[in-house]
Image (cartoon, rainbow, N blue to C red):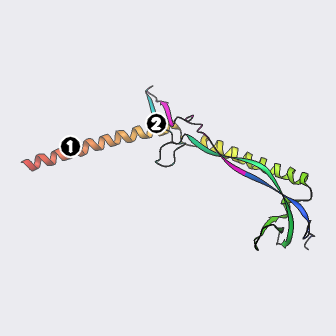
Amino acid sequence: NMSEPKFKVGDNVFRATRERRERRIECPDCAGTGRIRLIMADDSQVAIQCGNCSIGYEQPTCLVTTYDFSAKIEPICIQGVEYGMRETRYAYGGQENFSYSTDEAEVFATKEEALEHANRLALESQTEEDARFKGKYDGKRSWAWNASYHRREIKRAEKDLAYHKRMLETASLKAKE
């Protein structure tokens, strides 16, 4: 019970899609300084390296990546019709036995219909990207947590250092006896 495809080989139609462009912007957490200043519970201030715009142990770049989406339509000539279990696909374009394939839902008879669909795709993708970008910064451990963690680790390391120095002094005293 395969339905007739919307288009046939030789038809000139429009493919609706979206384009994604990478954009580097100033880090929203450190405002491009690479540092975060925190006021601790005892009112002392500490400055720590921004963990938002640094990758791993690298220095902060002061920039983060986001993406902009825009509608894109391209005129295509259908060169083949592919019947799948759930969808019809169209082959088009390309040289030297290399062709592309697209879902029937992305192909339109007029430029206007294609542009309307492409704008909808771009808007959906932009909305998802904006939510992902915002969530990436809302959901992270707080800067106060980071500072507290480093303070705790410094205290632990200082305690360990004092212990090992004592052990070494004890060992050298015993060696002299």
Start and end of the magenta stretch?
20-43
The answer to whether residue 87 is visible is no
Nearer-the-camera pick, 158 or 55: 55
Question: Which quarter of the rendering shows the N terminus?
Answer: bottom right
Q: Nearer the viewer, mark 1 or mark 2?
A: 2
Location of residue 87 (image quadrant): bottom right
Q: Magenta stretch: residue 42 in it?
A: yes
Disc number for residue 48: 2
Disc number for residue 166: 1
Q: Is residue 33 left or right of residue 18?
A: left
Q: x, y percentage for residue 82? A: 83, 72
Q: x, y percentage for residue 172? A: 13, 47
Q: x, y percentage for residue 83? A: 84, 73
- Check disc 2 and give the amino acid type: Ile
Judge the density around disc 2: few (<14), some (14-19), many (≥20) Cα neighbours within 10 Å.
Answer: some
Image point (43%, 27%), residue name: 44
Q: Magenta stretch: residue 50 in it?
A: no
Q: Is residue 88 left or right of residue 131?
A: right
- Check disc 1 and give the amino acid type: Arg
Image point (75%, 73%), residue name: 96
Nearer-the-camera pick, 56 or 69: 69
* Residue sitting farthest toward the top: 43
Judge the density around disc 1: few (<14), some (14-19), many (≥20) Cα neighbours within 10 Å.
Answer: few
* Residue sitting farthest toward the left: 177
Image point (74%, 48%), residue name: 69
Q: Label 1's element?
A: helix
Question: Quick one: label 1 or label 2, which is nearer the N terminus?
Answer: 2
Q: Label 2's element?
A: strand
Location of residue 27 (image quadrant): top right
